[in-house]
Amino acid sequence: MSLFAIAVNPLLCALGIVQILGVVAAASARLAEGTRYERGGQWLCLISLVVVGGLCGWSLQLGPGVSAACAVTLTLMTLIAIMDFR
């Protein structure tokens, strides 16, 4: 009998992957600013904001910890997209 039992839920792993991809999309939109890829990066960021926002609302059914993680990711994506770090 092992003391280190980890239950891996595929649904939570998929949510985590979508959240990571959302942050990457927001960062790539920010990095594409001023280049010919700017419009595509902005569309990708907008679509990922909609997807993560939808998951944030849907994840309320899974519990407060999961929905809080989605909310933090959504906030981080928004800050990356709108803040000027220069």
Image (cartoon, rainbow, N blue to C red):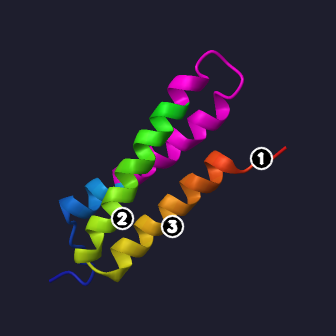
Residue sitting at the far right: 86
Q: Residue at x 26, y 63 (%)?
A: 12
- Of the residues shown, which amino acid type is indicated by label 3? Val
Dominant secondary structure of the residues highlighted in magenta in the image: helix
Q: Amino acid at mark 2?
A: Cys
- At a point 63% along the width and 15% down the height, the residue shown is 36
Query: Which mark, by number, is residue 72?
Result: 3
Residue visible at 72% across and 23% down? 34
Residue 18 placement (x, y as % from top left): 35, 50
Could you say which is closer to the camera, residue 1 or residue 61? Answer: 61
Per the image, label 2 sits on a secondary structure element best described as helix
Q: Is residue 17 above or below residue 2?
A: above
Q: Earlier in the sequence, mark 2 or mark 1?
A: 2
Residue that badge 1 annotates: 84
Left or right of 10 on screen, residue 45: right
Residue behind mark 2: 56
Q: Position of residue 37 (x, y in %)?
A: 58, 20
Q: Amino acid at mark 1?
A: Asp
**Quick one: label 3 or label 1, which is nearer the N terminus?**
3
Direction from residue 38 to residue 43 in the image, left or right: left
Q: Residues within 10 Å of mark 3 (few under 14, many from 20)?
A: few
Figure quadrant of residue 27: top right
The extreme top residue here reads 36
Residues packed near mark 2 inside 10 Å, few (<14), some (14 to 19) or many (20 plus): many
Residue 65, percent from left and from top = 37, 79
Q: Looking at the image, is mark 2 or mark 3 earlier in the sequence? A: 2
Mark 1, secondary structure of its residue: loop
In which quarter of the view is residue 35 placed? top right
Judged from the image, the secondary structure of the residue bearing numbered disc 3 is helix
